[in-house]
Image (cartoon, rainbow, N blue to C red):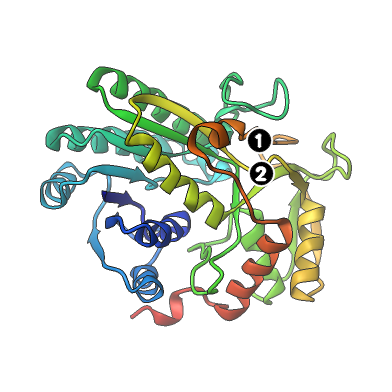
Amino acid sequence: MRVLVTGGAGYIGSHTLVELLGQAHEVCVLDNYDNSSPVVLDRVRKLTNGTVTAVEGDVRHDNTLRDVMTTFQPDAVIHFAGLKAVGDSMTNPLGYYDVNVNGTLALLRAMDEVGCKRIIFSSSATVYGEPVYLPYDEAHPLNPTSVYGRTKMMAEHILADWAQASGGTAVLLRYFNPVGAHASATLGEDPADVPNNLMPFIAQVAVGKRPYLNVFGDDYDTPDGTGLRDYIHVVDLARAHVAALDYAADHSGARAFNIGTGQPYSVQQMVAAFRTASGQPIPVVVASRRAGDIAAMQADSSRALSEMGWRATHTLDDMAASTWAWQSGNPNGFQSEEG
């Protein structure tokens, strides 16, 4: 397929490009490089020996979208472009609604103009909110506790209504917690500012870029008091997008899929795994809980297996080792190659 990938230079997007090119799909990336770098796409090209067409632009800009759509004529869109930090969303709600909701609306309008009827959406398990039961399945009530989660839920509703009205297909991938890096150690997570996610922060502490790790709350109702999360290796997550493209080719309407492992780990367990992988001490300081955080998350991803043939294969040790290989080999991320 010809696949337009919004936010394709980002962490998950770049790993997905590798998997798409490996399956002989033709890709075009639209990215404003707000939290990424064109260097990422150069590395994808070298890694795959593939062609990546790139357009710098914002997913909210109708004229840019129209130009990309009419020039590239995609068969499908994978929509990663968006803001993604829970804490930041609580202090910048308008920015999150603008990018995550208005960006999705603009994209769908542009798709309609060229008759593109398939979209894979980067959603989030935060749409579920406080668990009524665990593990979450796709029938779990949606009640997000953060602005970020609400923007993802709104976008899902918009996509479902669009799919029904247009006869299109919207595959809603509800990610749990993406971590890890490509086995080549040439691609990985490289936050532009202070990391909002656990694993890149641990990695920056291990490599000496930051003095210690803040653990936000050690008084949750969990075995060791720290938050439990279902972590998914980014390569497994990338492969879920390829599976979703295959699914979209044969189905219509909107369908949600959980993308996780079903095995949650605590913050303390993640730190311990990274200490083993890196051989570094990783000092920890306990801080107060963050607004919008919940005690535990765990995925039931059986629908993804039964309907898309997808399952996670990477272990916690894989996640920690690949992150350390990436961070230790690229202590300044992609910055060293930027002009």
Q: Residues within 10 Å of mark 1 (few under 14, many from 20)?
A: many
Residue denoted by label 1: 299
Left or right: 9, with 4 as reference point = right
Image point (57%, 25%), residue name = 138
Residue 282 seen in the figure: no
Left or right: 214, with 244 as reference point = right
Left or right: 206, with 60 as reference point = right
Left or right: 113, with 285 as reference point = left
> What secondary structure is marked by label 2?
loop
Question: Which quadrant would residue 325 be assigned to in this image?
Answer: bottom right
Mark 1: which amino acid?
Answer: Ala
Between residues 298 and 61, which one lies in front from this camera angle?
A: 298
x and y percentages locating residue 126 in the rendered image = 58, 34
> What secondary structure is marked by label 1?
loop
Mark 2: which amino acid?
Answer: Thr
Instruction: Specify which label sits upstream in the sequence, 1 or 2.
Output: 2
Residue denoted by label 2: 261
On screen, 56 above or below 95? below
Circles 1 and 2: CB distance less than 8 Å?
A: yes
Q: Please identify the residue farthest to the right as the structure is shown.
A: 223
x and y percentages locating residue 4 in the rendered image = 27, 50
Measure the alpha-carbon separation of dots 1 and 2: 7 Å
Q: Which of the labelled discs sits on residue 290, or is there none? A: none
Image point (75%, 70%), residue name = 277
x and y percentages locating residue 67 in the rendered image = 12, 49
x and y percentages locating residue 224 in the rendered image = 88, 45
Residue 15 seen in the figure: yes
Query: Which image quarter holds the C terminus?
Result: bottom left
Image point (76%, 43%), residue name = 227
Question: Which quadrant would residue 128 be assigned to in this image?
Answer: top right
On screen, 247 above or below 268? above
